[in-house]
Amino acid sequence: QVQLVESGGGLVQFGDSLRLSCAASELAFRTRNMAWFRQAPGYERGFVAAISWNGGRTYYADSVKGRFTISRDNAKNTVYLQMNSLKPEDTAVYYCAADKRPFRTSVPGISEFDSWGQGTQVTVSS
């Protein structure tokens, strides 16, 4: 497993931006697809965005497409989530996660992510 630590959450207003970071402590990070998920109170954890292990492919939930951008810097063992035009419905705890299998050519479902950070709270006020 990969140890992950998220940061960058906070309280912002409608329309503001935030950038979340997720730092990994192992070089294995560089071989894993990475994803961001989020969970709001009373809801299941849901997919937000993912990026392939080499950064060549990105995937987004329809609800964030065009507003959020996922990226990674393998030299820094870090994945980012740039969130623009934030809305109150984006309020949730955001988690980064690492694919359990290295060099996978497609992004799998949530059950295939076996390393999780502790989460960072994002609150968007109206």
Image (spheres, rainbow, N blue to C red):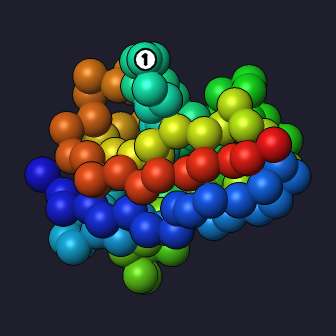
At which x and y percent is residue 102?
26, 47
Task: Give the answer, above or below, for where 101 lies relative to 46.
Answer: below
Task: Give the answer, above or below, for where 90 lies relative to 52.
Answer: above
Residue at image point 19% right, 38% down:
114
Residue holding disc 1: 42
Badge 1, how many Cα within 10 Å: few under 14, some, many 20+? few
Horizontally, residue 51 falls left or right of residue 53, namely right
Residue at image point 56% right, 62% down:
10
At which x and y percent is residue 54?
49, 58
Q: Quick one: 71 or 101, which is closer to the camera? A: 71
Residue farthest to the left?
A: 1
Q: Disc 1 marks which amino acid?
A: Gly
> Helix, strand, or loop for circle 1?
loop
Quarter holding the C terminus is: top right
Residue 82 occupies which quadrant of the picture? bottom right
How many numbered marks appear?
1
At which x and y percent is residue 99?
30, 41
